[in-house]
Amino acid sequence: MTGRDSPRTSVENAELALLLEVAGTPKPGNVDRHRDHDDLRFEHFLAGAVGARRGLALAADHDHAVGEAFERAVEGMSHQRGGNTQFGALLLLVPLVRAGSDGRALTTEAVEHVVADTTVDDAVAFYRAFEHVDVAVGDPPEGLDALDVRRGGAAERALRERGLTLADVMALSAEVDGVAAEWVRGFERTFEAAEWLLADEGSAPDRAARVFLRLLVDEVDTFVAKTADEARATEATRRARAALDGEEEAEALADEFVERGINPGTTADLTAGALFVALERGLEV
Amino acid sequence: MTGRDSPRTSVENAELALLLEVAGTPKPGNVDRHRDHDDLRFEHFLAGAVGARRGLALAADHDHAVGEAFERAVEGMSHQRGGNTQFGALLLLVPLVRAGSDGRALTTEAVEHVVADTTVDDAVAFYRAFEHVDVAVGDPPEGLDALDVRRGGAAERALRERGLTLADVMALSAEVDGVAAEWVRGFERTFEAAEWLLADEGSAPDRAARVFLRLLVDEVDTFVAKTADEARATEATRRARAALDGEEEAEALADEFVERGINPGTTADLTAGALFVALERGLEV
């Protein structure tokens, strides 16, 4: 008894979560079923999800390390012309798939074990993943230039000298990156949002769009803070609340945010993670 | 040298072909990125494609029979609430994946070999696939009630007594089913449409939408003939020509056909098959 209640394998659910996330509309500022960005379009996310599955399959296979699975997922994702489509989502999905594939129920505790078990090799593989695709990141913390993720595999020596595991690396970014924060906080928001999805009504993509807004209301999107600025990140959260309260049209907000380049990508990543947990727990499609 | 020019495996390209097909819009009468039917929605096609991959993987693995791969693909596809999403597309993709996975170039000749090599066991598995999902089919030819596909695995004895291979079964339906006709004609239209896709410009889903119209202009859709009637099937082809010639708005036609239940599903199947061949030959996404 694994606590799973799905006709699909965990790997299939992880890939489907990526597809349902991008299909959900309106998700203000994101590529969705009805909106593209100029150089990042819907079909890039489709190809990204398909390509990522080879790494997600490794995440479900305990003969392979978590870092290796992640790097392979990102490498597979990168075979399309849109650039970074699902890097952050995969950073949530890989440990979640691992946690749910050991015959135990997919719980906060199970994924905390996966995090705690990560190694320096996993951290090195994580850094290598940045060589496959351009990811928007901030500068590393003061004095940690040797650990700048943009160095890719060249950071290996610095990681080994300091004995940093992938969990340690995530902890270093947790304050400025909402995905890393999940690694530190036991995937708390991911699991909470999964319960919102399960308690909601309507189609899976419609639920995904609503959970995206709720997550954005709940916490400022760190990707907007990085790629735009803090003011627009705060604005995104404020106006998502207005949309949820019916004071703004979510569709108009979606058009405006795409136009202005306000892209709450971390919130989309969390939505994908939540969709995976919900699918594993029986969300029907 | 396999003649392949793709960063993805054949299995990945087959799944991506299913996704790009449903993303292409407008495809008059079909579920597409902008249109749902009442009970058959976009997300059902996403889940269908994800689930089908387990069978597509068997198609690429010569330790498994073509019929088994097909049945498994349909079984995986069926785990969503929309019903039949991609039965016909999979009936094209499975032999195409098999043909392209033996180290040879994916050619008409290679897929003709796959067809010629099918067995009675493959035919039995094909019949069993109908037990996983409701597929719209016409009545069997006069005197062939024992071979009605709606009998599913119960037709096994009739198939074995007559020694019918899957290729034989396809030949029996070739006149009334555009997918079966491809099996008989060396996947001629599929390969031709793949060349149209490669010669076209713009995004892969936009090319898919145009190739759908060209295929529909080219030949009457047998699924419309079955699920509606011959008159509407002829009308669909006539008005697709008008759309291609710019005399009708394809978007308006798409809305009208969905409204009237004119669903050129066989043309969509052929579009998915053509997308696969084009992806294998280097169509970029």
Image (cartoon, coloured by chain):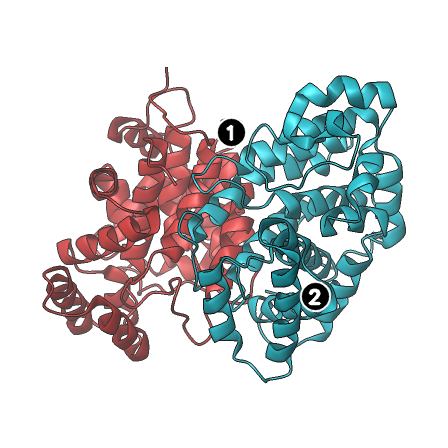
Chain colours: A cyan, B red
Residue A215, disc: 2
Q: From this view, report whether residue A19 is shown above or below residue A87.
A: below
Considering the numbered disc 2 on the image, is that residue within a helix, a strand or a loop? helix
Q: Quarter of the image containing the C terminus of chain B?
A: top left
Q: Quadrant of residue A27?
A: bottom right
Tell which of A140 and A214 is nearer to you: A140
Image location (x, y in percent) of residue A35: 43, 61
Front residue (pair A249, B77): A249
Q: Residue at x 14, y 68 (%)?
A: B239
Give residue B129's position: percent from left, percent from top. Answer: 48, 52
How far apart are labels 2 and 1 at the CA level? Answer: 43 Å
Give coordinates of residue A48: x percent, y percent: 52, 43
Quadrant holding the N terminus of chain B: top left
The relative height of residue A20 versus residue B276 in the rendered view (above or below) is: below
Mark 2 and mark 1, same subunit?
A: no
Q: Does residue A258 appear anywhere in the picture?
A: yes
In this image, B164 relative to A250: left or right? left
Instruction: Give the number of the disc on residue B61.
Output: 1
Which quarter of the figure has residue A216?
A: bottom right
Q: Residue furthest top?
A: B1
Q: Amino acid at mark 2?
A: Leu
Q: What label does residue B153 carry, if any?
A: none
- Seen in the image, is B79 located left or right of residue B45? right
- Give residue A137's position: percent from left, percent from top: 64, 41
Disc 1, SS: loop
- Kindly identify which chain the residue marked by label 1 belongs to: B
Of the two numbered discs 2 and 1 in the rendering, the one whose residue sits closer to the viewer: 2
Residue at image location 9% in from the left, 68% down from the top: B247
Position of A230 relative to B108 (above/below): below
